[in-house]
Image (tube, rainbow, N blue to C red):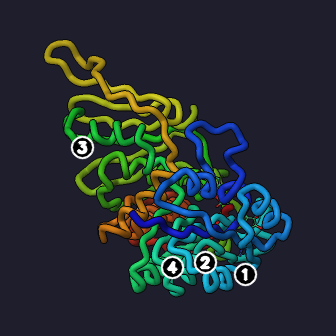
Amino acid sequence: MPTYRVAIIGLGRMGSTIDDEGHSALPYSIAAATRASARMELVAGCDLDAGKRSAFTERWGIGAVYEDYRQMVAQEQPDLVAVCTRAAGTHQRQATDADYRVDVHADLTVDLANLRVPMLYVEKAIACSMRRADDVRDAVSANGTVVNTGVLRRFDKRYDVVRDAVLAGRIGEPKAVVHYAPTSLLHGHIHSIDTLSWLIGDPVITRVRGELEPRDYAVVGGHIPFDPRATYQLQFEGGISGWTIPAASWEFEVLGSEGCVRSLNNGAGADLRVAVQGSGWQQADLPTVEPVSTAVCCLEDLVAAHESGSLSRGHMGVTHHITEACLAVAESHRSGHCWVDLPGVDRDLYVFHI
Ligand SMILES: NC(=O)c1ccc[n+]([C@@H]2O[C@H](COP(=O)([O-])OP(=O)(O)OC[C@H]3O[C@@H](n4cnc5c(N)ncnc54)[C@H](O)[C@@H]3O)[C@@H](O)[C@H]2O)c1
């Protein structure tokens, strides 16, 4: 079996060092995940910061480090590039002014697709506006690039168990999906909306309603200079509704006509209850799954899609759609918390995030 050459842009936490932070299910960083896979070889890294480049060389024994990613791609001819920079290209938590529209994930993804890199891992969110998300979708589609993004619950086998129960009809007809946890719009809810969608088989999201915190926050000039806390309601094709509850910690629940299934404690467990005639809902068995590296699963899914010509799990069709649903929460807030039919987001509405 061939191995594929992997290069990383952005040699910070997600690119290189996040494994030091005490997370479960390692490896987590793209460098460590690449090293753990028999299908990939780590060949190069790129960072604007010279200190990050030398730390990467020391940590991974990779001498091929670059300041300029275009030079890295030309020189190293990677099969897979991982974009692990921050989205808005700064360590600040807020845009410096109302004209700040930096969008590094989108810029790099468009350029790398046009440079004909065949596989891309892109950190979320793919863009800060739908104008740039459209550019990403168009470049990827024109070049036949295979893409997955950093919404890693989609690649987590512990969530597959929940999804399999839903899609096998064990809870009857799905009626509602719920996410629990307070979080921000583009750093957090890009994950929550993606996972809700994944758990019910990625039906089309037809409408979105939402609000940002503070509730009376006024969006000026199509520009939100920080990543706001948000709540939302989704309407999926086929009648399933989706909600986020801004309390507790990360859990997801799918409620159906004959039962419900809940992913517990940020994926650590899952609980299924099904209707038993005359006795209400009773506990039912689910397979137990040992946690494995979601980053490895995500990268190996790219390889599998590349080799088979099939869609990746987080392919651009679904990623672009989830990005639009996420930005529609801000659009809804701006238009008085009313429903936004998709696609219906102002292409120039920009939301700063990391
Ligand atoms: N999917 C996940 O579970 C997960 C976990 C952590 C972080 N993230 C995401 O990963 C991204 C990076 O976060 P981080 O915490 O690793 O950031 P970080 O600041 O630790 O690292 C980013 C690095 O990118 C470099 N960089 C920026 N622009 C560049 C460019 N044009 N060319 C080359 N290098 C460039 C910076 O110098 C920095 O070293 C963010 O979007 C974050 O949301 C995702």
Q: Earlier in the sequence, mark 3 or mark 4?
A: 4
Q: Are marks 4 and 2 in contact (CB under 8 Å)?
A: no
Q: Quadrant of ligand 1?
A: bottom right
Question: Which residue in the rendered view is the most extreme toward the left?
Answer: 277
Q: Earlier in the sequence, mark 1 or mark 3?
A: 1
**Residue 68 got which mark?**
1
Between the C-alphas of marks 1 and 4, the distance is 15 Å
Disc 4 marks a residue whose amino acid type is Val
Mark 2 C-beta to ligand 1 under 8 Å: yes
Disc 1 marks a residue whose amino acid type is Asp
Q: Position of residue 295 (x, y in %)?
A: 53, 52
Between the C-alphas of marks 2 and 1, the distance is 11 Å
Q: Earlier in the sequence, mark 1 or mark 4?
A: 1
Between the C-alphas of marks 2 and 3, the distance is 36 Å
Residue drawn 42% across the image and 84% down it: 143
Q: Earlier in the sequence, mark 2 or mark 1?
A: 1
Question: Which residue in the rendered view is the most extreme toward the front?
Answer: 1
Q: Which residue corresponds to mark 4?
A: 117
Above or below residue 240? Residue 130 is below
Decide if residue 178 is on the left or right side of residue 308: right
Disc 3 marks a residue whose amino acid type is Leu
Q: Which residue corresponds to mark 3?
A: 167
